[in-house]
Image: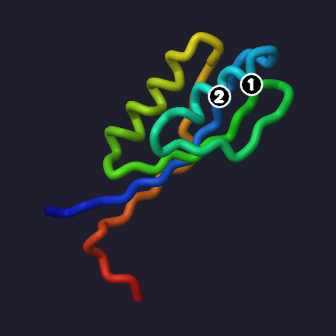
Amino acid sequence: MNEEYHISSAVVLCQPDRIKEVIDQISDLEGLEVHGFNPEGKIVVSIESQTRNNIVTTLEDIGKLEAVLSSNLVFHQFESANEEVS
């Protein structure tokens, strides 16, 4: 079996007056880390997972949060765990 490792970054836009609430909610999601935010409601996150489907599901879950206006993938990279590093 070919194992993969996926890492993505995304920008989440939420209602500015609820940014703390949204950061708390998305910080609880598995494999997700908040790297920064601004007062206008933009939050930068990274998502790490074993599968591409989990990345997509996590972005969809973020987008379903009540105060979230959008969640957009910025970067996605994956590597096979079986690849040799030189």
The extreme bottom residue here reads 86
Q: In the drawing, what numbered circle is on residue 24?
A: 2
Q: With respect to residue 12, does 64 lie above or below?
A: above
Q: In which quarter of the image is residue 77?
A: bottom left
Q: In which quarter of the image is residue 26?
A: top right
Residue at 75% in and 43% down: 36
Residue at 64% in and 36% down: 11
Structural crowding at the residue carrying mark 2, measured as other residues with C-alpha within 10 Å and reported as few (<14), some (14–19) or many (≥20): few
Count of numbered marks: 2
Q: Please tell me whether mark 2 sits on a helix, a strand or a loop.
A: helix
The extreme left residue here reads 1
Structural crowding at the residue carrying mark 1, measured as other residues with C-alpha within 10 Å and reported as few (<14), some (14–19) or many (≥20): few
Q: Please tell me whether mark 1 sits on a helix, a strand or a loop.
A: helix
For this view, does 56 lie left or right of residue 44? left
Q: Identify the image quadrant of the N terminus.
A: bottom left
- Measured from the top left, where is residue 58 in percent x and y? 44, 33
Q: Identify the image quadrant of the C terminus.
A: bottom left
Instruction: Give the residue number, with chain letter if any, for mark 1.
Output: 20
Residue at 41% in and 40% down: 55
The extreme right residue here reads 39
